[in-house]
Amino acid sequence: MKKILAVICFSFMSLSFANAGILTVGVSGSAGLLDVTGKETITGVTGGDVVWGETSAAARAAGTATAATSTKESDEVGIGFVSMFGELGLFDTGLRIGLSYVPYALESETTENVRNDNCGVRDPATGVDHSALCTQTTNKVSVDLEDLMHMYVSYHHELDLPFVSSVFIKAGIIEADVITRDVLSSGSNYGNTSLSGDFYGLGIEKNLDTGMFVRLEGAVTEFDTIQLKSSGSDNTNTIDITGMDGATATISIGKTF
């Protein structure tokens, strides 16, 4: 749906305003770092526990045979992407409304963890204690971001300087589809969801003799919390991704018609 919306918006801009002198189009390259905190909680409906990265003996000694176990990690994630953008100027006020779109999927690295399942479980039918047994399992999860879009408003102030033609500030919202690619030993799988957030930034623009321009800008982004929950097995895996924010630097080249 977002891909269709982007095509309609760019087509509308081109058809309706190409000769009005207020249409700007171009291509951008962005790179940055995001601080991400993720927590995965495993809930076993039969009372079996999940112990991360421990042996069965260590699990029993620590007394961690619980119905729900979680692990939490924080990390810095590098991002980089190329996008195309279009803007409409508003009546020579310096204000512009814009849309940028990434026409391909952004693929994350695969996250892999090893855990020990079903430590300290007593068979309800026979009463036999299986505390000496743990099943070591490996799970792999990766995420794709598809149809990443930035929708924004910017204000440009013209300058008469040798290396800077204008300065600008901008703010807007971000949306994308989150597609999970997982291999879970339990046989369950995570569903897909959407990602949204907001950003603000500032930059400079230099007009070139060719009629093109070059922009340099920096922006700060804050994403909303997202949750992924698995289905298809007795255990429920829940991933909460919080505190996802960071900064990006962007260089753009374009032309105003």
Image (cartoon, grey):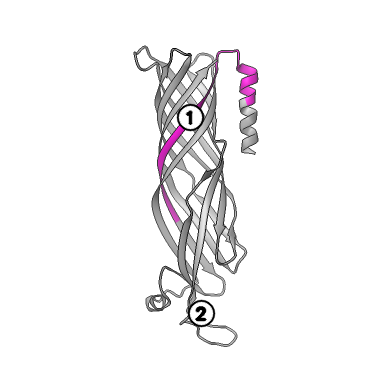
Amino acid, disc 1 = Ser
Mark 1 burial class by Cα count in 10 Å: few <14, some 14-19, many 20+: many
Q: For residue 121, which numbered disc appears in the image? A: 2
In-image side of 113 versus 8 (left or right)? left
- Is-magenta flag for residue 25? yes
- Return the residue nearer the eye: 212 or 101: 212
- Is-magenta flag for residue 227? no
Magenta stretch bounds: 11-38
Quarter of the rendering containing residue 216: top left
Query: Residue shown at 61%/32% (left/top)?
Result: 6
The kind of secondary structure element at disc 2 is loop
> Circle 1 is placed at which residue position?
28
Amino acid, disc 2 = Val
Quarter of the image with the N terminus is top right
Query: Residue shown at 35%/17% (left/top)?
Result: 163
- Return the residue nearer the eye: 169 or 55: 55
Query: Residue shown at 59%/65% (left/top)?
Result: 187
Q: Position of residue 34 (x, y in %)?
A: 41, 44
Q: Is residue 85 above or below residue 143?
A: above
The kind of secondary structure element at disc 1 is strand
Q: Position of residue 28 (x, y in %)?
A: 48, 29
Mark pair 1, 2: CA separation: 55 Å
Quarter of the image with the C terminus is top right
Q: Is residue 6 above or below residue 227?
A: above
Q: Position of residue 20 (x, y in %)?
A: 59, 13
In-image side of 249 versus 177 (left or right)? left
Q: For residue 59, which numbered disc appears in the image? A: none
